[in-house]
Image (cartoon, rainbow, N blue to C red):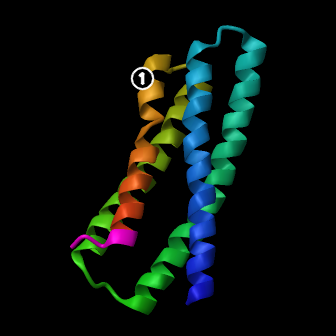
Amino acid sequence: MLWIKAFHIVFIASWFAGLFYLPRIFVNLAQETDHAATERLLGMARRLYRFTTMLAVPAVLLGVWLWLGYGFKGGWLHAKLALVILVIGYHHACGSLLKKFENGQNQRSHKWFRYFNEVPVLLLIAIVVLVVVKPF
């Protein structure tokens, strides 16, 4: 199980790296006026979203494996799983926002995306605290 846990942590860290950077690309897209630069940023965002999705799948599957191996004990785990569902929702929201950029339908400002960019940081902090401290 330690190998499963180690790879789970690696995939989680990699997934979150993508979730930290993708909204940063959105900030730049929301500010960009040059068509060539916009296309370059969209290409970067598409590739990063696909890659981040490929990292999310084993992260979640390994998490389920750990859950089945260790059991579903403690209120902290319920809270953590609720936050993981929020992370998955955030990931899908990034995909939806990317589609809006691709279709020229973005209505949000670069300032909004700066705040949106902070959400995965807060989620990761909360999840790590729950897993390490197990407060309840």
Q: Is residue 87 left or right of residue 76?
A: right
Outermost residue, top direction? Answer: 33
Q: Position of residue 8 (x, y in %)?
A: 57, 73
Badge 1 density bin: few <14, some 14–19, many ≥20, Cα 10 Å: few
Q: Is residue 53 above or below residue 6?
A: above
Q: Is residue 107 visible?
A: no
**Secondary-structure class at tag 1:** helix
Q: Position of residue 19 (x, y in %)?
A: 55, 46
How would you classify the magenta stretch by its main secondary structure? loop
Snapshot quadrant of residue 23 = top right
Q: How many marks?
A: 1
Q: Is residue 91 above or below residue 83?
A: above
Snapshot quadrant of residue 58 = bottom right
Q: Is residue 112 left or right of residue 31?
A: left
Q: Is residue 91 above or below residue 84?
A: above
- The quadrant of the rendering that contains the N terminus is bottom right
Q: Amino acid at mark 1?
A: Trp
Q: What range of the chain is rendered magenta?
A: 132-136
Q: Is residue 99 above or below residue 8?
A: above
Magenta stretch: includes residue 102: no
- Who is closer to the viewer here, 54 or 125? 125
For mark 1, what is the residue?
112
Residue at 76% over, 25% down: 40
